[in-house]
Image (cartoon, helix red, strand yellow):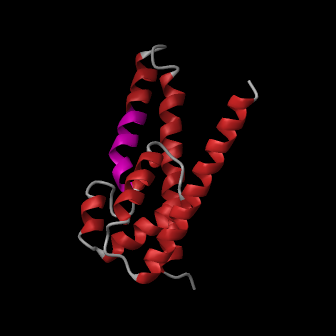
Amino acid sequence: MPNQSDRIKFSIKKNAAEVVRLHKRIHETFALRDVSQEKREEWQKACEEFHSKYDELAFPGGCRGVIDRLLEGDSDTMEAVICFLEIRPYFFRSGYMFDALLRKAKRAPLSAKQKSRLQIVADNVRTWKASKRAARDLARGNQ
């Protein structure tokens, strides 16, 4: 039986896939929006659908106010933030969310287990950034 973290991660992944699908639909309809009024309306509908659903899909409980809920110690939000950081979903603006959540989670009243999980995420980010810098420096040295 899946635990709370597994359920949250499943939900985040499923919702991220839907954000990607909705965002892709905007781009597909954008290319044809000037062909006819019908195509313009299709594009507008895609935009409206994306924007109306983004907040609820981008983060469990909605992304508006997530930082406040995290810093106030809302237990569901704290767990959802850790799960989000652990799986690092990829969709429109998720990188900005990841960075903001990582910064703020360091000051949130997390449990010892959550702090340990957050430290693993932070260590992985540091390792990733160091390897990216090393690759960039190597590329510059080979020019």
In magenta segment, residue 54:
yes
**Chain part drawn in magenta:** 45-56
> Which residue is depicted at the point 42% across and 59% down?
102
Q: Position of residue 23 (x, y in %)?
A: 48, 39
Q: Position of residue 82 (x, y in %)?
A: 45, 68
Q: In this view, which residue lies farthest toward the front?
A: 141
Q: In this view, which residue lies farthest toward the top?
A: 35
In magenta segment, residue 122:
no
As rendered, which of 6 and 21 lies closer to the eye?
6
Q: Position of residue 110 (x, y in %)?
A: 36, 76
Q: In this view, which residue lies farthest toward the bottom?
A: 1
Q: Main secondary structure of the magenta part?
A: helix
Task: Locate the C terminus and report the quarter of the image it occupies.
Answer: top right
Name the quadrant containing residue 79: bottom left
In the image, taking residue 3 as reference, residue 141 lies left or right, namely right
> Which residue is depicted at the point 50% across and 53% down?
16
Q: Position of residue 26 (x, y in %)?
A: 47, 32
The mark total stands at: 0
Residue 82 sits above or below residue 46 on the image: below
> Which residue is depicted at the point 63% across and 44% down?
132
Task: Locate the N terminus and report the quarter of the image it occupies.
Answer: bottom right
As rendered, which of 52 and 78 lies closer to the eye?
78
